[in-house]
Image: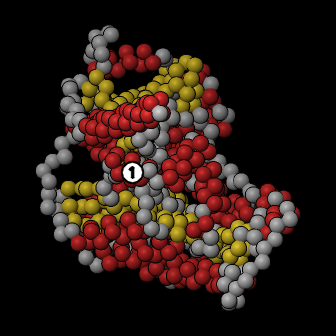
Amino acid sequence: MKSFLKTVFANIVAIFIVFFTVAFFFVIFLLMASLSGSDTVKIRKNSVLTLDFRTNIIDSPSEDETGSSIFTAFNDKTKNVVLYDAVQAIKAAEKDDNIKGISLETDNISAGITQLDDLRTALQNFKKTGKFVLAYGNVMSQAAYYLGSVADQFYLNPAGGLDLKGLSAEVMYYKGFTDKYGIGVDVIRHGKYKSAVEPFIREDMSPENREQLSAILNDIWQNISTKMSVSRKMSNADFKTVTDSLYGMIPGSALKYRLTDKLIQKSEYDDILRSKLKLAAGKKINKVSFTGYIHSMDEGASSSNRIAVLYASGAISNGEGYDGIHSKNYIDEIRKLAADDEVKAVVFRINSPGGSANASDEILFELQKLKQKKPLVVSFGDYAASGGYYIAMAADKIYSEPNTLTGSIGVFGLVYNFKDLAHKNGLNSEAVKTNENSNFYSPINGLSDGAKIMMTKSVEQTYKRFVHFVTVNRKKSFEQIDAVGGGRVWSGTRAKAIGLVDELGTLDDAVKFAAQKAKLKEYEVKSYPKKVSVFEQFFNDMNNDELYAKVIRNKIGEDNFKLFQELTEQEKKGKIIMELPFKINIR
């Protein structure tokens, strides 16, 4: 008995020790997290603003939470910087006597196409002040070289290389796989260019999808290759030859064909920076990170006149959530902004490939109500397609970037069944029902005949509703919008030409126009929705489904995770979707 009590007592003590140890480290974690965001950085004289490999450029503050958790916070050395803040930092550095120049030292920058464009434009304006912009690379991605090529001088490691090769899009087709393993797919869509469903109904690329992909890729490449060739003082023809020949991969060839100015080691590059700063050999260079510089910036006096930038980044879904655009969250935010008298105008920043048609419609309705009270200006990021374009239809004015994937005015429904797979393995099912279509959907037997008919009608009705709102906002006829709709995706440049957007411009341009429309000379810009705290994120991670999803996403990658969701998320079964079929990244 005494031995038993000792064992029980020892176990109780062990449990208390574990509990208090975990609690102790949890408190320490929260304290460190809260202190890390409040550090102020003093910028010393003769400093260099530096963009290095630790910096990720994100479009929206909400993206700062994606994939983050208490389990990775200590190990993650990268810092996320919102694009608008990065651009404002470069602008502030133009007038900051302590900042003598900017150094770009990133081999694999994490940023979207339009984000790179905006950074490049800001750096070009910075150069006009007479301050220097230098860049150095080891083995550089195409995206990093696109940004780095804007520098006054671009330096490459003698054993490095440039991944300069142009753009391509590769689509995986699943029809052969689904046929082989007995997975059935019921597809209802409107729009011959709505290629999101093609991988499930074809074994090759349709002429329509090949046409739109070719047009988009060529539009984007024409834009970015021209900028690179101008920066490197090369003709478009010469730059095309260099790219086609993959000369950037060999350092000697990169130098010979003027892709780089000199082949040097990193320590030699630092010596060049010292020379620019008039520092003695071996003297420490005061490099300031973008995150540090943003923390140091004077926010200025607060104003009762506020421009709200409402960020909407990611897929559109119903309900609540932190990851993406969830209708309930955004309805609440929009209503708060509409009721806030200090908010004089709203800029709605969209970076979304679309998603749920119902959720998109809910968000659009609230934006239409907000527009009745104050100016509403829309700014597009990398994507404003399908549902992402739909929710822009309340805008007074729409700004798009030249490389924004825009439009995709189309609708589809996609439902899986495992009838053949089940039958091949001796499985069968029968249902008892009270009405003709009570068994609307079954994993074994798929959609009922009545369900297919009604889903087809629902897709057609949703498409007509989509086009209606576009005709009202763009002041065009149904026939005009239908002609450029059909699910087709356009570059921002072509979207401007065909009237799907009003202007080509940045988020900063949209903010300035919103202030002008609200007749404001002095104002402050504030971001919404508010960033989720580490404490809130921790308890969000306590949800097992959310935690499992993050683990799976980290293991299989974002693209594979999307396919996994398509196959496993039951709530999407039988729903009407407005979503872009692909994404384009410069790599």
Please tell me which residue lies in front, 426 or 488.
426
Please tell me which residue lies in front, 17 or 156.
17
Name the residue located 55 percent from the left edge and 27 percent from the top edge: 139
Q: Which residue carries the number 1 mark?
A: 539
> Is residue 320 left or right of 418 when viewed as pictured?
left
Q: In the rendered structure, which amino acid carries the disc numbered 1?
A: Phe
Quarter occupied by the C terminus: top right
Q: Residue furthest bottom?
A: 435
Q: Quadrant of residue 437?
A: bottom right
Q: Residue furthest front?
A: 1
Please tell me which residue lies in front, 483 or 547.
547
Colour scheme of the picture: secondary structure
> Is residue 495 left or right of 274 when viewed as pictured?
right
Q: Residues within 10 Å of mark 1 (few under 14, many from 20)?
A: few
> Residue 89: x and y, percent?
29, 41
> Residue 527: x and y, percent?
29, 56
